[in-house]
Image (tube, rainbow, N blue to C red):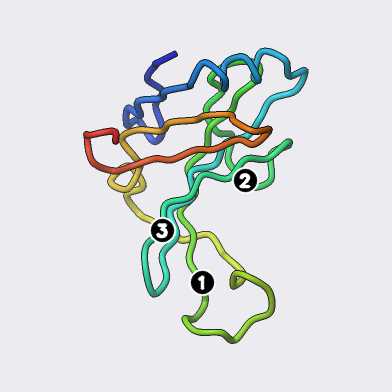
Amino acid sequence: METTIHIADKPVHLQLSHTAQAALAQRATPLYAEMELYFSCLIRFKVRFYEKQVHGGEGVRVSDQLVVNFRPVMTAACGRDYEGDEPPLTDFPIVNQAAFVPRWLRIDYSNGEWKGEFGISDAMH
C-alpha cells in the first residue's frame, strides 16, 4: 500500500509492505511508528515502534492500526558520559519543523519484527 500523509503540513509518502499490511490488520490496538531524527555528534534516522503513544504529539492516524509521528531529538553531550547503549534523549526544539520532516517512510514486518526507514530526499531506496 502506498499513500500520502501530512506532518507539519508537509506531504510524506508512506509505503507499507504486504507483510506489514497483514500484520497491522491483525492488531486490535494501533501501532505507533515514530520517525526519530537524531541530532548529536552525527545525524541518524531511525524508526521506532511502540505499542502505545510514548512521546507527546498526536501523530497522524493512518488507520485504526497505525499512527505515525515525527520526533527530532538530541543528546546533551557527545562521548560516553552515560550508562547503557545510548545517551538519554531530549526533544530538539525546531522552529520550522516542516523543513526537517522526511519526504518518505517505508514500513515492513518480517521475522516477527517491525522495520522502518525514512529519508529526506525524494528518492526512496
Between circles 3 and 1, the one closer to the viewer is 3
Q: What element carries label 1?
A: strand
- Residue, x 49% and y 38% (percent of image)? 116
Q: Of marks 2 and 3, which one's residue comes earlier in the chain?
A: 3
In the depicted structure, whether residue 16 falls above or below residue 102: above
Q: Residue 118: where, in percent of width, then height?
A: 39, 40
**Element class at badge 2:** loop
Q: Position of residue 46 (x, y in %)?
A: 48, 50
| Residue nearest the observer in this picture, 123 or 98 | 123
Above-or-below relation of 27 to 38: above
Comparing 114 with 83, the one in front is 114
- Mark 2 surroundings within 10 Å by alpha-carbon count, few (fewer than 14), some (14 through 19), many (20 or more): few
For image coordinates 66% across by 13% down, the residue present is: 25
* Circle number at residue 44: 3
- Amino acid type, mark 2: Gly
For the point 23% across and 34% down, the residue is: 123
Verify CB contact (< 8 Å) between mark 2 and mark 3: no
Q: In the rendered structure, which amino acid carries the disc numbered 1?
A: Thr
Which residue in the structure is indicated by mark 1?
A: 75
- Residue at 72% from the left image edge and 15% from the top image edge: 26
Q: In which quarter of the image is residue 90?
A: bottom right
Q: Which percent across, then down, holds residue 18?
A: 52, 15
Is 50 left, or right, of 19 in this rendering?
right
Quarter of the image that includes the N terminus: top left
Q: Name the residue under label 2.
A: 56
